[in-house]
Image: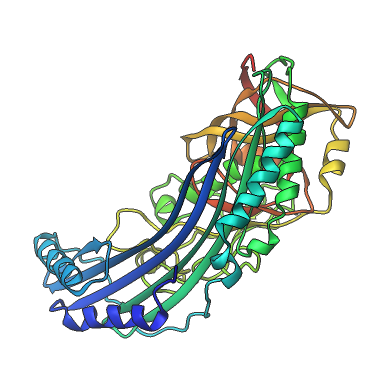
Amino acid sequence: MTLLSSDHALEVCQALVKASPADETEVTLQSEEDRFVRFSPEGPSQNGDRERHSLSIRVRLQSDAGWKEARATVGTFGESETRAALGRAMALAGAAAPDPKRLPLEGAVEIPGSAPHRPTQDHSFREKAEWIERAMASCAEADLAPAGLARTTVYSRTLVNSAGRVAEGALSRAHFSLTASPTDGTGDGGVAEQTHCDVGCIDADQVIARAVDRGSRGRNPRLLPAQEYTVVLEPLAVSSLMLFLGYAGFGAQELHERRSPLVGRIGERMFPDGLQLHDDAGSADHPGWRFDGEGTPRTRVPLIQDGAFGQPVTDARWAKLLDLPNTGHSAPQPSSSGPSPENLVMGAGMESVEQLISGVDNGLLISQFHYTNLIEPRDMILTGMTRGGTFHIQGGQVGESVCNLRFTQSLVEALTRVSGIGNRPEIVGALFDGEIVCPALRIDGFRFTSATEL
């Protein structure tokens, strides 16, 4: 497959902007190539080799009462289909209520260039099958049942507006994950995964070894009482907590509506000095889109710095409303969703995972959380379950596996009790959505409320 070329995408977008009768027009065209294989104990169970396009047209009509605007989207870039989408957008904008707070579109900007990573784009099904074959063989030797995903995806995005703005970019993602579960059902499955923009940085053998080790050691778990424990959270577990700060915590709209952890806490030193969290689309190992839904360049934003909350991320509208810089975190407009961070990067500490564990007298090593949900946003009270390998730590040593436990815990409070930060960040995602670059964390007094029998 071949992504739509940059010149072709630019030509399509510019032609629609020129053809639009609206007072202002913005056109975004995203293309995607996606190759994936899911596998189970029987072998590959689902695969796809897909090329997809999404063209979105935003039109704006000026009135005495403010801007009226709407957006229409079509899954192709053929001329008749895109002109029909333009017509739909015009009709919807005509029926929209005017908004005096909407700002005019902004003009030309400089966006750092990016291109799809060619080896990731060319990664074949044969190469993915080799990963899967090794995973199945290792699981068979350990009497474990494998399940997982091998995937490579590349994206390109072009945005053009009638004020003269042009923004172009590309992303690449490679991913391999494995869950290795005891075939006799006597324990939770061991989980491991890797994600990177460069498929050559995926160490499939390391993923396999980690999952098989967790799955093998997870047999016949022991029931522990639900109480407060010092926990060592591996990066997958950290991701399920920290990503909620992106979903519902660090946007200007949430701050304005007083449903954010930032309310009354910006600049307050609440956390250990070593705790650092940024939104950084320019991360070398895990780059994101360098421009937002309005084509504004994304800036690196300190969200937690030297133990204190920083300012929220903004877009054009919320930056003006709150008298803050526009950080380039807009959703495609019009939208009821405010700006949000999409490229969370947590700073590394000085300790290995083994050193984090050695500092625990009685606690838990946790591989992953799932069914994680937000109960209350101001203190980020979350609830969820352990998964993928949970082990008792005694006297600084990892011991027997334990049954899964449910937690109910304020993330803000938990971060005040971080007593160790790992020195090896990983690119990890949560089961629901999103990715973060983060290390392992040791947290004291993490609250568990109930336990399962497995």
Quarter of the N terminus within the rendering = bottom left
Q: Total label count? A: 0
In the rendering, at what x and y percent does residue 375 appear?
47, 32
In the rendering, at what x and y percent does residue 440 appear?
73, 45
- Write the residue at 54% across / 39% down: 379
Compared with residue 58, is residue 168 higher up or lower down, i.e. above or below? below
Compared with residue 109, is residue 414 higher up or lower down, i.e. above or below? above
Compared with residue 226, is residue 419 higher up or lower down, i.e. above or below? below
Q: Quadrant of residue 30?
A: bottom left
How is this picture coloured?
rainbow
- Write the residue at 56% across / 30% down: 384
In the rendering, at what x and y percent does residue 207 appear?
71, 46
Work out whether residue 101 can be spotted.
yes
Of residues 307 and 130, the one drawn nearer to the viewer in this rendering: 130
Of residues 181 and 158, the one drawn nearer to the viewer in this rendering: 181
Q: Quadrant of residue 390?
A: top right
Of residues 227 and 384, the one drawn nearer to the viewer in this rendering: 384
In the rendering, at what x and y percent does residue 403 appear?
68, 20
Work out whether residue 262 can be spotted.
no
> In the rendered view, does 246 fall on the left or right side of 185?
left
Quarter of the C terminus within the rendering = top right
